[in-house]
Image: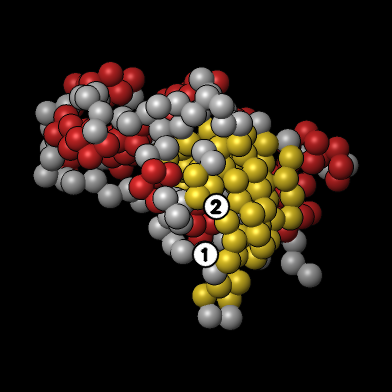
Amino acid sequence: MPLVKIKIMIEIENLSKHFGRTKAVDQISLQIKKGEFFCFLGPNGAGKTTTIKLICGLLKPTSGLIKIGGIDIRKEPILAKRLLGYIPDQPYLYEKLTPTELLRFIADLYGVSDDGQKLLYLFEMAEYKHTLIEEFSHGMRQRIAFCATLIHFPEVIVIDEPMVGLDPKSVYLVKRILKERSKEGVTIFLSTHALSLAEELSDRVGIIHKGRLIADGSVEDLKEISKANKFEDLFLELTQEG
């Protein structure tokens, strides 16, 4: 059931995750509104994937609070995760199933009646609905992963590097569909290395460096503050060493 009264769909407060002496995530606080398209940027090893796994409940934080749609993901993980759709950078799919079988299986897990056929059509995979997933290219697998993520109508979609290895047609499809979902009120949290993608799609960006959130705002606002002419210049300026 849509949480129409909830305005903040992702709430992070003083979030930290330590691996030994390494502070992978260090005191991050962030609020992302319903329907907002948020892009999460940072150099390799900055803490992006760790943050995403914390948001999705795949890692336990060292300290801090995470709420999805107002629900504490540590106290009520199943309820919070029903609102979430998560696409990792390398999604796992059951290769001996067809797309139709996989989507029926996932729909059953979430208790929804959708058979996924509209999603297969949307991602231009309907003609392969009875083909074993093991026969698919990387791009086709990514499209199926998106179908599997969207089948329970998540209100928050968390994505880690969605465009890696995709052909131009798949990239176009994914960008269009994510933007449409955002306009419909779905909150998008997308981690990416592609600055041009963030600049094109985001309502707001956050930049993480050495585990800390060092910038948060629209691309234009951040460029104005730094006086950088290009977003790439801004990013390099903020994440330079030393």
Q: Position of residue 86 (x, y in %)?
A: 40, 43
Q: Does the CB distance between marks 1 and 2 fall below 8 Å?
A: yes
- Residue 185: in sight, yes or no? yes
Helix, strand or loop under label 2: strand
Residue 203, by quadrant, is top right
The residue that appears at 31% across and 30% down in the rendered structure is 151
Mark 1 residue type: Pro
Q: Which image quarter is the N terminus in? A: top left
Residue 194 location (% of width, % of height): 57, 43
Residue at the farthest bottom position: 21
Q: How far apart are the alpha carbons under marks 1 and 2?
A: 9 Å
What percent of the width, then of the height, locates residue 186? 50, 28
Residue hosting label 1: 61
Closer to the camera in the image, 90 or 9: 9
The colour mode here is secondary structure
N-term-proximal mark, 1 vs 2: 1
Kindly identify the amino acid type of the residue bearing the numbered disc 2: Ile
Residue 182: x and y in percent read 53, 26
Q: At 24% from the left edge and 24% from the top edge, which residue is drawn?
A: 114
Q: Quadrant of the C terminus?
A: bottom right
**Residue hosting label 2:** 66
